[in-house]
Amino acid sequence: MSGDFPKNAEEARLDRDTTREELTETLTALGQKLDVKARVKENVDEKLDQATAKVADVTNEPTAVKFRQGADAVRANPVPVFAGVLGLLILIRLILRRRNS
C-alpha cells in the first residue's frame, strides 16, 4: 500500500484490517504501560530475585529459599507484618524511654 486511498473494496478491507491490527497493538502497549500495579509487582519480583541471589551467594541455598519464602509471605500479608513491626518499634521506644528515665 502506498498510503493512497484504496482503489477497490478488497484494498479497503485489507487497509481496515491492517489498521485494526496496528490499533490493537498500540492499545495493548498503552494498557501495559498504564498498568502501574503490574509494573510495580514485576519490579518487586525482579528485586527479590536479585536479593535472593545475593543471599545465596553470601550464605547457602536453603537460607536463600527461606529468605524468599519470608519475602513472599510479607508481600501476601503486609498488614499483619506492618502491625508487628510497628508494635516492635513502639516496644523499643518504651524500653529506651525507661532506660533514659
Image: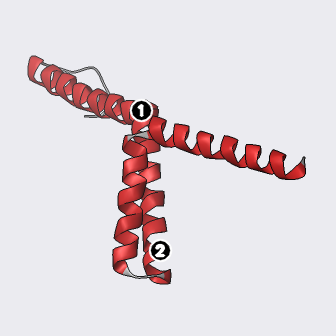
Left-right relation of 19 to 55: left
Residue 56 drawn above or below residue 93: below
Nearer to us in this view, 68 or 93:
93
How many numbered marks, from 0 up?
Answer: 2
Query: What's the residue type where badge 2 is placed?
Result: Val
Q: Which mark is residue 55?
A: 2
The type of residue carrying mark 1 is Asp
Counting from the top left corner in percent of width and height, residue 73 is at 37, 49
Q: Is residue 86 above or below residue 58?
A: above
Secondary structure, mark 2, is helix
Q: Do tag 1 and tag 2 residues touch (Cβ < 8 Å)?
A: no
For label 2, the crowd category at 10 Å Cα-Cα, with few meaning under 14, some 14 to 19 and many 20 or more, is some
Position of 9 with respect to 45 (left or right) is: left
Where is mark 1, residue-wise? Answer: 35
Residue pictured at 45% horizontal, 59% vertical:
48
Q: Nearer the viewer, mark 1 or mark 2?
A: 2
Q: Quadrant of residue 15?
A: top left
Neighbours of disc 1 within 10 Å: few (<14), some (14-19), many (20+):
few
Q: Residue furthest left?
A: 10
Compared to residue 13, the image places residue 78 above or below, namely: below
From the viewer's side, name the closer residue of 82 and 23. Answer: 82
Snapshot colouring: secondary structure
Where is residue 72? Give x, y as percent.
37, 52
The residue shown at (42%, 78%) is: 56
- Separation (CA) of disc 1 from disc 2: 30 Å
Pinpoint residue 67: horizontal percent, then vertical percent.
42, 65
Q: Give the structural element (helix, strand or loop) at label 1.
A: loop
In this rendered view, identify the residue nearer to me: 75 or 51: 75
- Upstream in the sequence, badge 1 or badge 2? 1
Q: Nearer the viewer, residue 95 or 65?
A: 95
